[in-house]
Amino acid sequence: MTRPKKLDPSSSPRAMLGAELRHQREKAGLSQEQLGSPLFVSGSFIGQLEAGTRRMQLEYAIQIDEILQTDGYFERNCGAATKSKYPDHFAEAAEAEAVAVTIKEYAPLLIPGLLQTEAYARAVFRAYHPTAPEEEIDELVSARLERAQLLDDPTNPMFWSVLDEAVLRRRVGSPAVMAEALRHIASLIRRHRIIVQVLPFSAGSHIALGGGLKLMAFNDAPPLAYLHGLGTGQLLDDPASVARYELTYDLVGAIALSPEASLALIESAAEAFAHEQ
């Protein structure tokens, strides 16, 4: 079993709540499975709460206070731990992403959020919210760029993405915006910061035609899979489901271009957009 890492309670409300949950559970002499049983959740789920990769819902907080006799501590504090700048369907995935050690993402339509430039993200959000005031778009863009700072670290997390060729061809914003966005990805690849493969149109039908997929692995918690669509998202921790989607990702990667051929195609598409501009 992987030794739980030492949490930094000052890093976020969720980390604070997770650290306290671990402390109180161990103080009560309960294993993660024993605490999870009366909540009808797995020991893995309790581990994810303690690691900060899952948010604590109010219903669980109330029951945990009763089981651990913590005088309403978790009920009082879970509100702060569940506040997020992200949409409800994505908030939990974004917060798990922030502590993941490995992120794998299949992107069928758009450049993944962690790889987007400011101009590309602005064009995406303006398309999503055509009548929103500029201040609202600014906030959305700022949150996305803040997420992208994960890749400022030279090695962690390891990020590997398979991009459908549609991601390269669909113009989001102006040709100049696309050229900049694709060159940004190429730069990250050339710096050996990320791994990217392109799934070409010539591959035809494949197992992931149904939508986007993100896989996240952690040092001290079980892996998660996140499925996303139009204004919806589902975060899965069931081991069988996660294993199925890990296989899905592997099969997509198997029919995608090599990283070297993918880089050449990305740079070629960037040049085509630059010449169009």
Image (cartoon, rainbow, N blue to C red):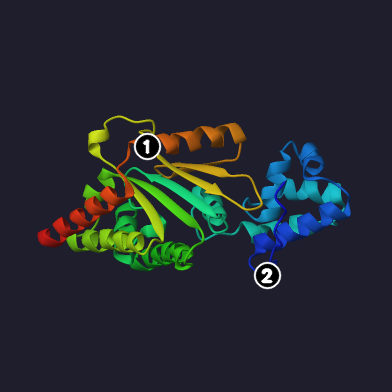
Mark 2 surroundings within 10 Å by alpha-carbon count, few (fewer than 14), some (14 through 19), many (20 or more): few
| Dot placed on the residue nearer the N-terminal end, 2 or 1 | 2
Q: Amino acid at mark 2?
A: Ser
- Which residue occupies the foreground of this view, 173 or 111? 111
Mark 1 surroundings within 10 Å by alpha-carbon count, few (fewer than 14), some (14 through 19), many (20 or more): few
Count how many numbered circles sit on residues in the image.
2
On screen, residue 193 versus residue 246, left or right, reads left
Q: Which residue is mark 1?
A: 254
- Which residue occupies the foreground of this view, 162 or 107? 162
Q: Residue, x 29% and y 54% (percent of image)?
A: 127
Q: Amino acid at mark 1?
A: Ala
How far across and how far down the image is residue 244, in percent?
51, 32
How far across and how far down the image is residue 208, in percent?
38, 34
How far across and how far down the image is residue 170, in percent?
23, 48
The image quadrant that residue 37 belongs to is top right
How far across and how far down the image is residue 267, in percent?
22, 57
